[in-house]
Image: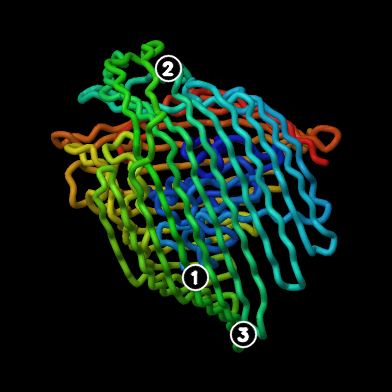
Amino acid sequence: MRLFVPLSASLAAVLFAGPAFGQATANAVVGADDAFGFIAGDEAVGIYDATAVRGFSLEAAGNYRVNGGYFVKSSGVSSFFIESTTVRIGLNALAIDLPGPSGVVDYKIRDPKAGEASYLTVGLDEYEQPYVDILLKHGDAQDRHSAALGLGVVFDNDNGQGGPSGRSMLLAGTARVSLGPARLQVFGGEYDYERGGLYRFTVADGVPPPRPERGQRSVQDWAVERGQRRILGVMTQAPLTGAWSLGLTGVFSQEDPSRAVAHLYRGLDGDLTGLGIAVVSPAQQATAWSGEARLAWSGRWEDTRHRLAFIGRGRRSDSRFGGDRIVDLGMVSLAGPVRAVAEPDLSGARANASSEVDQRGLGLSYRLDWRDRLTVNAGLLRTDYEKASVAADGSRSAREASPWLYNLAGAYRVTERLDLYGGLSRGLEEAGSAPASAANRNELLPAIRVRQVEAGLRYALTPGLRLVVAGFETEKPYAGLEPATNVYGLIGVVRHRGVEASLAGRLSETLSVVVGGYVLDPTRDGVSGGRPVGVERFRAVANLNYVVRAMPGLSLDAGLEHVGRRPYRSAVGGVQPMLEADTTLDLGLRYRLPGRATLRVQALNVLGDYGYLASPAETLAYTAPQRFRVLVTKEF
């Protein structure tokens, strides 16, 4: 599934990659508090998302929260049970217990109120795929219970690269019961998909990145992927005696592909010719069980409010992978349809490698509020991390780590309009897994230690418009490709220093804006090869939503994104090849139709920018071309 404002192919990783396209009424520009990353329904705004925060991937790091509670995500989430998604860094992370240094992706679970409308959505997505979503919502008038249940179907699933089409279906929802002040909420979803496999490519030495025709089928006809994703979670919050309360979060998350296909074309030249392989994988599986318990005390003393939480966390992750069949495609030209090659036999193929991670942590989190002028968030966590791996040849390896982790941050209100804040933290994060193009494809990398310091300010220009400016430095081990062996792993240390800015809110009663950007100095030590691959020095976004008073029910919106030059491979001979800067423009409108219906129309990548997505594994894929999206949501 794609998120649309601004244009960013990587945002799709946040949701189930299929139906649940959201509603025409969802408006991220109006709902965002800042420009650091916000999703409402299927539309997103901000300079960051789950795959890129200050130049790092929170998806790889595993820094996820649901209603503020810790969990580990192996599959995905859906807008059927997620009301909004916020990237929390700096000031907006002060309300999170034990936040990660690189930031946190925080999901807010739906909790419908009495009278809240249900939705039926029909439309054509950006690749002219017809789809239907229905989201039923119920809220009790006494607020004793609520529920939401959604079903989404895509009838002709296009992957944007012209590969074999497929279909997908998603069933997901949430339910909440309150017994007095105690609350119990569950959420979950099951996603079944069939879709065409994708391809990526590398570039021959001394050749500018070539431009394959976008949307042309450049994979084998049998390159079809199938599988399921599922998630189930439970959350409880209950007062105990006096000022004490208990909160519990538990989540099961699973990625369960029965067949996966990835094409790689190496050394494309100016004629779009290179050596091709296809990696065809049998059934694999990645499962995560995770949970958190919070015993919290809250109290007041004179002009101060205090909250002290004792926190226990745990997770067990189990990955099964390997058994791939490598198909030699020979010399391939992407100037036209690729030559057909026989489909490999997967009947005897089985996953033959595994990784298991056990992690436990005990910590203490403290928050202080003094006269609504000073806020402090401090935490200390002792975590025990164990990873055991079995390779395809039967060899075993194990890693252990038991670090002390901490966070300390605070904000001070200097005037009614000005807040100053700062913080430092040290965390343990995941480093992701090896991509299909690497020799150790799908291998889970070891956990890494991360350090960050930051400081900034927030200034209210008007009651509805706020400016945030911050400086930061983040340091962590660098995951990348070792060219000599084609093994993806930890090959150095990367340090990102930068300044970020956000301006968000209402300029007038009719105009809402989300504007932001950052300037970054990414460097890496311990390896030759220059800057980190795929990380730009500059990014800026500007999103506008304008309500047309002269035509009641009509609003116009625009999203502009500029991404600076960034390297797409390591330096060779002291020279590091760069991708050119990209600028994309999206235009859209919403119109309130008679009968409680809303029309949503968007023109995406209006300027026709041809860009590339560069991965740390030093492979490329092109971005999407000009396209349109139309949907109608009926409320009932």
> Residue at image x 30%, y 50%?
390
- Front one among 354 and 187: 354
Q: Which quarter of the rendered picture does the N terminus lie within?
A: top right
Which mark's residue is nearer the viewer, 2 or 1? 2
Dot 1 or dot 3: first in sequence order is 3
Give the number of the disc on residue 300: 3
- Front one among 91 and 596: 596
The x and y percentages for residue 5 are 56, 38
Looking at the rendered structure, the secondary structure element under dot 1 is strand
Looking at the rendered structure, the secondary structure element under dot 3 is strand
Q: Check disc 1 and report the residue beneath it.
A: 411
Give the number of the disc on residue 213: 2
Dot 2 or dot 1: first in sequence order is 2
Type of the residue with mark 2: Glu
Give the number of the disc on residue 54: none
> Residue at image x 60%, y 43%?
190
